[in-house]
Image: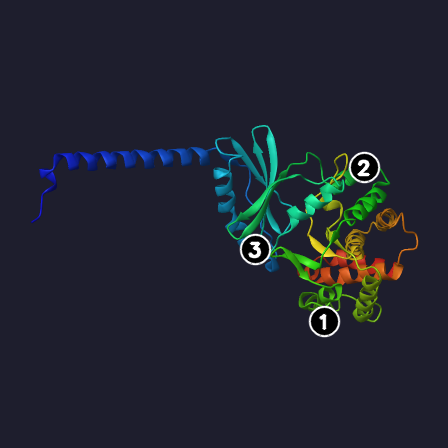
Amino acid sequence: MSLALGSHPKLTRRIKLFSTVAILYLSGFLICYNFLMSQINYKNKPRLSEHEIDKISNDRRIALVPLLESFLSSDEMFVGKGISVEYSYQGVSALVAFIEAGIDKYVLKILLNPTAEGEALFLKKWEEVGVTVPHVYKEGKLGDHHYILMSFVEAPMLSEAIENGLVKSDIWVDLGKILRNMHEPSAEGYGRLVDGKAEYTTFKDWITNEKVQEKIKYVEEAGLLDTKLWPISNVIDTLVAYDERNPKSSYCHMDFCADDIMASDPLTIIDPEPMFNNGIIDIGRSLQLMSAQGNYDHVEKLKEGYFSNNASYDKSALRAAIILSAYRKFPYWHKTGRDKEMAMVRKYLIETC
């Protein structure tokens, strides 16, 4: 036997009351959500690379924007505050945004590669030994991507300060000493941090891994380096032998140059490409990147600062590290039309190696 709803007035009133409460609750939620979202002011949009090789990175950068919005709308540090967001146009490996919340300023960095991690760990390790780096407030994952919320540094990039004559001439000696200090803490393993540990157990495993070999093959086939002058087999043998004599893995920056240093007082080191490796690989990388700008005197001063306590350093191993860095960096530069930079590195290698 069926019963008409109208024959039960109490039940009818309860259903109507429940429906009214549910509508009010949902309306309140939507009002609060829209209120929070409306307080986020975007000054610009993420800049996308014009190079075909960066298409995947562009797609990932666009896909991360909703995750950034969700984070700012729900994290306890930002809920209910007027927020201003300005996307950084520096860097290719992350979506970086400068966040203003009242009088406070932060940097939110979301890594494009879901497997990339470790930056927060490296920054904290360097901070422990007295290196000035952005302070890490929070770290975690947004979706499948690691993020870091850091302090904002109110200072120009070192490259900009140099152009405007705002830094002292011996700054590169100081930077060499800073990089040396960054290599003091000991690490375990070699390569990127993956699932909480280094990719490779030994240095030889890292230097002969498939990714490195692919880049070497690209350089050889494209004729980007004179393989007779700088045969890669000699480079690898020299570096493997060096690591056997100096078997220490360090927390390496792998992009230590004027574009990743803030001209604050003291200087602030930012934006590493974190890798566990022998320190000789990191200093070699820095010298190769700096030589691409043609400032060879800066290269020598950085070298002077780094080896200031070790006048009898292994010059053959350092040359090999610079050459290896060129082999690893040139494929991307070639695909993005950075012929001038490659020419400057080759000139430096001819004059010094």
Figure quadrant of the C terminus: bottom right
Residue 221: mark in rendering: 1
Expressed as whole percent of the image width and height from the top left, the position of residue 351 reads 88, 59
Inspect the image, locate mark 2, and give the three-letter code of the amino acid beneath it: Val
Choose the circle earlier in sequence order: 1 or 3: 3
Expressed as whole percent of the image width and height from the top left, the position of residue 296 reads 85, 51
Helix, strand or loop under label 2: loop
Left/right placement of residue 202 relative to residue 37 reads: right
Residue 114: mark in rendering: 3
Of the pair 243 and 37, the residue shown nearer to us: 243
Inspect the image, locate mark 1, and give the three-letter code of the amino acid beneath it: Glu
Q: Are marks 1 and 3 in contact (CB under 8 Å)?
A: no
Separation (CA) of disc 2 from disc 1: 42 Å
Of the pair 145 and 244, the residue shown nearer to us: 244
Residue under the image location 67 percent in, 68 percent down: 210
Separation (CA) of disc 1 from disc 3: 30 Å
Left/right placement of residue 257 relative to residue 87 reads: right
* Viewer-side label of 1, 3: 3
Choose the circle earlier in sequence order: 2 or 1: 2
* Viewer-side label of 3, 2: 3
Q: Residues within 10 Å of mark 2 (few under 14, many from 20)?
A: some
The image quarter containing residue 178 is top right
Expressed as whole percent of the image width and height from the top left, the position of residue 241 reads 83, 66
Q: Residues within 10 Å of mark 1 (few under 14, many from 20)?
A: few
What residue did someone put label 2 on? 167
Helix, strand or loop under label 3: loop
